Image (spheres, grey):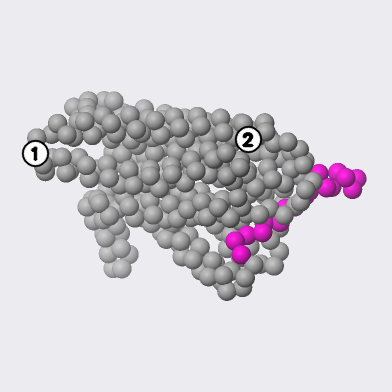
Amino acid sequence: MEGSNQTSPERFILIGLSNILYLQILCFFVFLVMYVLTLTGNSLLIIAVRINLKLQTPMYFFLSNLSILDICFSSTIVPKILINTISVDRSISRLGCALQMYFHLALGATECIVLAIMAYDRFVAICNPLHYTNIMSKMLCSCLAAGSWSFCFMNSAIHVVLTFHLPFCRSHHVNHFFCEMPPFFRLSCKDTWFNEIVMYISAGIIATCSFVLILISYVNIISSILRIRSSQGRQKAFSTCASHLTVVSLYYGTIMFMYLRPPSLHSPETDKIISILYTAVTPMLNPIIYSMRNKDVKGTIRIIFIGHSL
């Protein structure tokens, strides 16, 4: 019975970011501000797309999907960070940990694919403008979105089942601020080579294939833009892609560095810093990046605030 409890703990302890009091207080307020900005910015973007007919296009349909993903992704992790930062008890149940890992992996992978679909959307809009409405039909957009969500949620279930079938007999203390796969591999007394191979294959297929699709789309986009004779036309075309490219660089850079590094390069402190970037910082920045360059979005958000103030 005692051996069973060692290999199948009912609760894990999340060590968190720091044990120093003033750093804990600082972390609490920084994460709280980022979370409020994430919820506010993404919610405003979703509302703006819903109420402005000009924004009800395939591009903004996927942008709304991205905002929903960011809200859910951040809500899966940040509230637990806030609670653990001010709480003496940093434990999390086995089921709670499995659910957090499941939604974090599923939502993160879905965001990868949605960003790739958005790149394809820009490719069709710039390279085939006359056929854009026919190609990017409502049916296709709905199927692409539903397919992305479904595939990634099924893929996540495989990783969670494999991870929580490992015997965790080294320790119940997770050197991280949320339940993520690499720190759990370090807790197992069993060789985790199979789990790591499955993780690399999955991350490779989702992240690399999505990244390649983005790369191919932008190679064609750039070649089409360079053929535009007027500098004003080129600038307008580039501006529609700049926001997406910024978001892609932020998100893919951190995700690929986190999940495609060899095990020898993984360290708890580096993992924590990278995780902060894609779980809290990127979801907060996405709506800001997309809103800054878009007059229609900014105008609609102003109308929302004016309407509420009257």
- Where does the image place residue 93, in percent across and percent down from the top left? 72, 52
Which residue lies at the image location 37% right of the left edge and 30% below the top edge? 213
Q: Does the residue at mark 1 contact the one at mark 2 (Cβ under 8 Å)?
A: no
Point out residue 76 in the picture as x, y percentages from the top left corner: 56, 51
What is the secondary structure assignment of the residue under circle 1? loop
Does the segment drawn in magenta span residue 9? yes
| Residue bounds of the magenta highlight | 1-18
Question: Where is residue 303 shown, x and y percent of the image?
Answer: 26, 59
The residue where tag 1 is placed is 230
Residue closest to the eye, 191 or 302: 191
Q: In which quarter of the image is the N terminus?
A: top right
Res 47 visible: no
Mark linked to residue 208: none
Within the image, what quadrant is residue 122 found in?
top left
Q: Residues within 10 Å of mark 1 (few under 14, many from 20)?
A: few
Mark 2 or mark 1, which is nearer the start of the sequence?
Answer: 2
Q: Residue 8's spot in the image, x, y percent? A: 79, 44
Residue occupying image coordinates x 38% and y 43%: 248
The residue that label 2 is drawn on is 196
Is 77 one of the magenta-colored residues?
no
Q: What residue type is labelled 2?
A: Glu
Relative vertical location of residue 196 with respect to residue 287 in this rendering, above or below? above
Front position among marks 1 and 2: 2
Q: Residue furthest left?
A: 230
Q: In this view, does 22 lie above or below 10?
A: below
Amino acid type, label 1 = Ser
Residue at left 53%, top 38%?
Answer: 260
Label 2 environment density (alpha carbons within 10 Å; few <14, some 14–19, many ≥20): many
Residue at image coords 17%, 43%: 236
Near-viewer residue (181 or 305): 181
